[in-house]
Amino acid sequence: MQATSRAVDTTVFVGPSTYYTATGTLGANTVLRLRGRTMSGDWLLGCCINDNQNYWVRPAYVTITGNPNPPGFPANVDTSQPQWDPNNPRWLPVFPQDPALAPRPIPTAPPFGDYPLARYDRGNTGRVPALPRPPLQSSWGGLSQAAQVFVSPLAVSGPNVVSSSQDGQIYSFNRDSGTQRWRFNL
């Protein structure tokens, strides 16, 4: 299946994850030959760079266009429907991961009480067990301040609470004491 890269310096990998070694970069509008995909379709297998080496790239970084109907394509179907579009990557065969590569890390559920993303927790509910009841009292004190108001949702992971402020900084605070651990200027 033919495609072109969308972005300048699109990084491609030896396996279907950023966990694997980067094998090179593709310039904008580089013509690609796609040979397969992962079962979920979140990675596409391309060929060939660096002495005919296969590589994996995310579908978000490629534009698939100009392909004829693939083998086994049914006759008399409406190709304006997404499932019958000959440029749909679902027509690519599923390629297994190279067994010589280390397996991808297995995702684990966030620990109880952690909120690594906004409105996301172990049960994917984003809910706390119970709302705090008045009188409310800050256990952090005055050490957990920024130059301007916080504008992003909090991410809570282990001993860290991370958020960004209107002052253009990302802050990390200690979950228990509220002391600033670090900040990063955006």
Image (cartoon, rainbow, N blue to C red):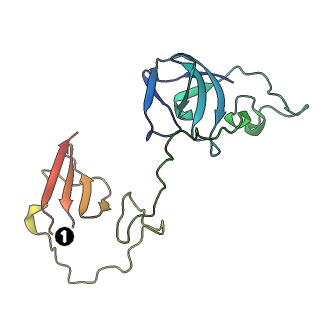
Residue 145 visible to the viewer: no
In depth, the one of 37 and 62 nearer the eye is 37
Which residue is drawn at the image coordinates 44% and 39% (left, top)? Answer: 18
Residue type marked 1? Asp
Q: Residue furthest left?
A: 142
Question: In which image quadrant can residue 62 be found?
Answer: top right
Position of residue 7 relative to residue 149, above or below, is above
Query: What crowding class fits label 1: few (fewer than 14 Cα within 10 Å), some (14-19), or many (20 or more)?
Result: few
In depth, the one of 152 and 18 nearer the eye is 18
In the rendering, at what x and y percent does residue 90 appear?
Answer: 70, 38
Q: Residue furthest right?
A: 76
Position of residue 123 relative to residue 25, above or below, is below
In the rendering, at what x and y percent does residue 128 appear?
Answer: 38, 74
In depth, the one of 140 and 1 nearer the eye is 1
> Which of the image's four quarters has the N terminus?
top right
Q: Which residue is mark 1?
A: 176
Which residue is drawn at the image coordinates 60% and 31% (left, top)? Answer: 45
Question: In which image quadrant can residue 55 be found?
Answer: top right
